[in-house]
Amino acid sequence: MKLSKNSRPADSLEAVKRRFKLSPAKAVVIFLAVIFCIYLAIGLYSGLCIRYYTVDSEKINANIRIVLVTDLHSCKYGEGQSELISAVKEQDPDIIVLAGDIFDDLRPNDNTKIFLQGISCVCPCFYVTGNHEFRVDENTFEENMDTLESLGVTVLSGEAIQAEINGVSLNICGVDDPEGAKGFAYQLESVAKQADPKLFTLLLSHRPERFDSYVGYGFDLALCGHAHGGQWRVPFLINGVYAPDQGLFPKYAGGLYQSGGTTMIVSRGLARENVPIPRIYDRPEVVVIDIT
């Protein structure tokens, strides 16, 4: 039996339809796969964000704006660090605090030095070490500290100073990272004793996992980094998957925490191109804190 010429295209068309016809189950799988790819693509976006917090205190009678920068690791943010420098300046801070790992032990620190030069003239800057600052030889460490000193950045190494900001006196305390400061507990106790208890007391420390210690000394506000936001997040469900010195599902991955009259704010930091695995739903951030 011969097929007519007119029947062949129709038959071919039906064959194509049968070949590409999806079952409901396959359609659902493809739909979910597309949604997951979109979700992952959005999560991998690593553009800089600004995160804001407000801390109320009866010890403060004027607004003080703090910009917190942590875990830069000499990563690049635009030509001449313009993106990061502009982001800090636009917040119009009263003080800038640098809570560790601003320098890196493996990458050249050109980006860090450019950034420090760009922000050191904006307002008073205060710095404490992170663990990576101590993972270099002694000469390199001293060179990094000399860079800070030459730019007028105040390095707090187990010290407490009394500063006047917007007409308000407050204590600014800083401790070295435990990796370099063998007397971390001593430094913490020392700065607590140096601080005037009648004034608002700010503690700068790289390590959020030591929160219980900060509460024990009665600091009003502790500012930390180190956790890198837990690296991977699931919005509204998991705040972080893994953080150094906290392990899986860290308690203090990033955000605001309160206990016993002490508030701790943990920055998710700025490290991005030097991390071994990409950040997911964990954008690098500059933190702004308004104390009122």
Image (cartoon, helix red, strand yellow):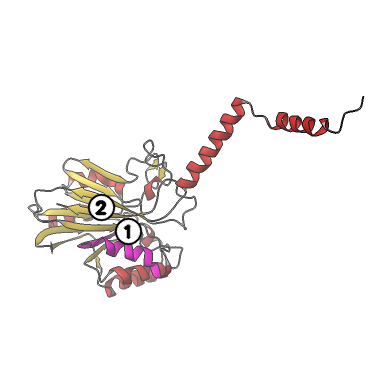
Height in image: 118 above or below 28?
below
Residue 101 belongs to the span the image colors magenta = yes
Residue 117 x/y as whole percent: 32, 72
Residue 203 x/y as whole percent: 21, 54
Residue 81 as seen in the image, left or right of residue 51 = right
The residue at which mark 1 appears reads as 100
Label 1 sits on what residue type? Gly
Residue 262 belongs to the span the image colors magenta = no
Most extreme residue toward the right is: 1
Packing grade of label 1 (10 A; few <14, some 14-19, many >=20) is many
Instruction: Please tell me in which quadrant of the rendered image residue 159 appears.
Output: bottom left
Instruction: Choose between 149 and 213: the one closer to the eye.
Output: 149
Height in image: 50 above or below 145?
above
Residue under the point 36% across and 59% down: 101
Label 2 sits on what residue type? Leu
Residue 280 x/y as whole percent: 45, 46
Say what secondary structure mark 2 lies in. Answer: strand
Could you tell me if residue 173 is visible in this image? yes
Instruction: Please tell me in which quadrant of the rendered image residue 230 appears.
Output: top left
Disc 1, disc 2: CB below 8 Å? no
The residue at which mark 2 appears reads as 223
